[in-house]
Amino acid sequence: MLEVIGLSVAYGKHAALENANLSVGEGKMVAILGANGAGKSSLLNAIAGRVKPASGRVVFAGQDLANVPQHELVERGLALVPEGRGIFPRLSVEENLALGALPARARVGAKAQRDKVHALFPRLTERSRQIAGTMSGGEQQMVAIARALMSNPAVLLLDEPSLGLAPIVAQDVFRALEGIRAGGLTIMLVEQNARATLAIADRAYLIEAGRIAGSGRAADLRDDPAVINAFLGGASARETNT
Ligand SMILES: Nc1ncnc2c1ncn2[C@@H]1O[C@H](COP(=O)(O)OP(=O)(O)OP(=O)(O)O)[C@@H](O)[C@H]1O
């Protein structure tokens, strides 16, 4: 469904991402894991048309996205939940969701999509009149995800949705993503929280210093000693946390 071929991103002379190759199959959740500054956001932003790649290609549903303008990507079915959420803090939950439903593709089955979003996030239904900026961090993240879903996407791209959230709140976010995946949507999830991500993803790619350093089934990576040491806090953390 989504294929990244030899993608590189540079900011001036600084190479943030070098020759990344990956693919996301339809209906799968694929995670991109890496430390701060590894190049995860650069990868996601290049896919979502926010950063122009230095080289390489992104192919979505069989079409090269090279010359597709960013606003057109939403119409093609790529929805991004950016780092920092990007919601409208002065607008209500309802108004944020309505803005998510503006793309023409959202008109196809709009009511069904709205019902699906409300079923996934009952708290947002209860709080539909609340000003988004007054909600908790976890609730705001839910608003951001719900808004992206309102565009009726074919692929949901998320940049560190658990960032800055207390562990128990982050769990709610991961549970919501699991529910979205169970509904059949294709998901690409960039995260630093490797443990929680590998628990729900189908596959993962590991990024280190701008390069894809490994990949595999999430279930295999969870048990890989090298991954445990580099991404899951070492053997002792594994014993106490699993
Ligand atoms: N607009 C920019 N201009 C210059 N350098 C940038 C820019 N954006 C990112 N970088 C640099 O590129 C590298 C990769 O950054 P990127 O944000 O992609 O990493 P990341 O893995 O998403 O990190 P984080 O988890 O901290 O968000 C870093 O060294 C970063 O400082």
Image: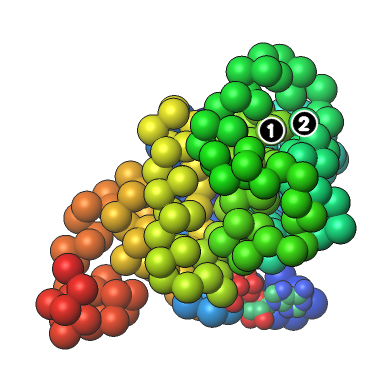
Is disc 2's CB within 8 Å of ligand 1? no
- Answer yes or no: is residue 14 visible: yes
Give the quarter of the image for residue 183: top left
In front of the other: 213 or 125 = 125
Q: Label 1: few (<14), some or many (≥20) within 10 Å?
A: many
Q: Residue at x 41, y 71 (%)?
A: 167
- Answer yes or no: is residue 211 visible: no
In front of the other: 234 or 206 = 234
Position of 10 with respect to 1 (left or right) is right
Is disc 1's CB within 8 Å of ligand 1? no
Ligand 1: image quarter:
bottom right
User: Which mark, by number, is residue 101?
Assistant: 2
Percent of width and height locating residue 47:
66, 49
Mark 2 touching mark 1, by CB under 8 A?
Answer: yes
In the rendered image, the quadrant that contains the C terminus is bottom left
Label 2, label 1: how many angstroms apart (C-alpha)?
Answer: 5 Å
Q: Residue at x 29, y 55 (%)?
A: 199
Q: Number of numbered discs present?
A: 2
Which residue sits furthest top?
Answer: 109
Q: Amino acid at mark 1?
A: Met
Q: Is residue 200 above or below residue 230?
A: above
Q: Residue at x 71, y 15 (%)?
A: 108
Position of 102 with respect to 62 (left or right) is right
Percent of width and height locating residue 55:
69, 56
Q: Secondary structure at mark 2?
A: loop
In front of the other: 234 or 225 = 234
Which residue sits furthest left?
Answer: 239
Q: Residue at x 22, y 52 (%)?
A: 219
Q: Which residue is mark 1?
A: 150
Q: Amino acid at mark 2?
A: Ala
Q: Secondary structure at mark 1?
A: helix
Percent of width and height locating residue 229:
25, 80
